[in-house]
Image: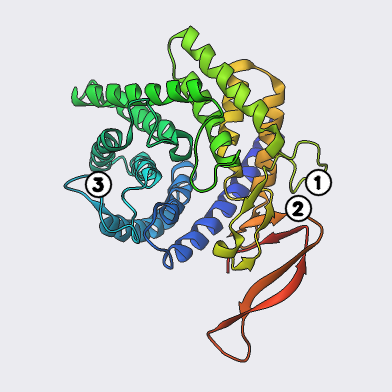
Amino acid sequence: MEEVAKRRSSSASHGRGISSKLVVKRCAFLKRQALTAKCGLGFSRCTWPSHSLPDAELHARAESQFAPFLEVTLNRTTAKLKGTKAQTWPERPQNNSWMIGLLTDRYQVTKNPDDLDLAARFADNFIRDFQQADGSFKGYSALTQGNWFLLDLAACEQPLIDQNPKWSGSRERLLAAARRSAEDMVAKKDNVQTEGQRVFEDTMIGAAVTLLSLSALNEPDPLNRQRYVDAAKLMYAKHACLRQEIVPDARVRGGSLRFWESQYDVLMKPNMMNSPHGWTSRNSPGLLFLYLLTGEERYLADFMDTVGSCIQMIETETGTLRWAFIPDPFIKADVFEPDPEKPGQGRYVSKTLGEAYIIYR
């Protein structure tokens, strides 16, 4: 038992070190970001280590970046995004749903009732403005991850109901909206939508697995719970064509495939297949949920494979979060690099790449 305790202590210390480096890197990176929701998601990565591995200095550093971000993106009076499409893009449903997640994450760390109240009012606006008659959130529920954020917020409100009855009504609204969205995903299954091209896309399918299985975990009616489980299992089976299940390379095993936007994110062209990539982990919580719901070991094994490939996206010595891994052995690409003859400017250089991690520049 003493040896087990030592190993746990060593593991926790190692995890704290990696998280600390990642938070430091992310806070520095956020100073260069725009105001869109995807940029704001980095704050969740800052607050989660503060929640699970408390560190006052890291929390203060994350707050020093989050407070001004919130000030310029959110109208506290109306509990809505402010700014134009070029700034916060308030008409985009996932920019709103992800803000619910950010505010809920912050409350879980600070326990400040003002954070919870703001999250609840923002969620009410999100439901009213974006949930359609069929239960979907402006056509693509999976991409918004609306169910996840609404259920997470409802869980935070649950312990406060006895203290203030207003949380009972708020929680019921959240649960009702999440259930309507889940029913829409059960009905449509893989006939869902995403942004951009109409393809069988990794993010929307993988996220649907997670949202349906999470809804099953929160569903008290056993018949409805089984319907959600069955739909999640079906979606996961269809998602197999986008997963690296038989590759022996631990860098990619469990990763999902996506022809991602390298020319935008890392200034490398043309686009290329990446695995794992930024959205690979969208389905990993769903795998763990399915294991808890069914007891089938294959879901746990797939979960561990996915987490294993994703965790390697973090360079543990520095905390650098890599952009993606290129599984192909040979790619000819134009890579944007600093121009030694023109300080402060860059140029494209033709290079041959393959089986390599790509980092942000």
Q: Nearer the viewer, mark 3 or mark 1?
A: 3
Rendered image: mark on residue 327: 2
- Mark 2, Cα crowd under 10 Å, few <14 / some 14-19 / many 20+, is many
Circle 1 sits on which residue? Answer: 249
Look at the numbered disc 2 and give the secondary structure of its residue. Answer: loop
280 over 293 or under it: above or below: below
Quadrant (top left, top right, bottom left, bottom right) of the N terminus: top right
Q: Amino acid at mark 3?
A: Lys
Residue 156 appears in the figure: yes
Quick one: which residue is furthest to the bottom in this view? 341
Is 191 on the left or on the right of 103, as rendered?
right
Q: Report the colour scheme.
A: rainbow
224 over 263 or under it: above or below: above
298 over 320 or under it: above or below: above
Q: Position of residue 51 (x, y in %)?
A: 44, 43
Q: Position of residue 297 (x, y in %)?
A: 71, 22
Answer with the quarter of the image where residue 184 lies. top left
The answer to which of 285 and 324 lies nearer the viewer is 324
Rendered image: mark on residue 80: 3
Residue 315 appears in the figure: no
Structural distance between the alpha carbons of marks 2 and 3: 41 Å
The answer to which of 211 and 220 lies nearer the viewer is 211
The answer to which of 209 and 296 lies nearer the viewer is 209
Which of pointers 2 and 1 lies earlier in the amino acid sequence? 1
Q: Are marks 2 and 1 in contact (CB under 8 Å)?
A: yes
Answer with the quarter of the image where residue 355 lies. bottom right
Q: Amino acid at mark 2?
A: Pro
Q: Position of residue 305 (x, y in %)?
A: 71, 37
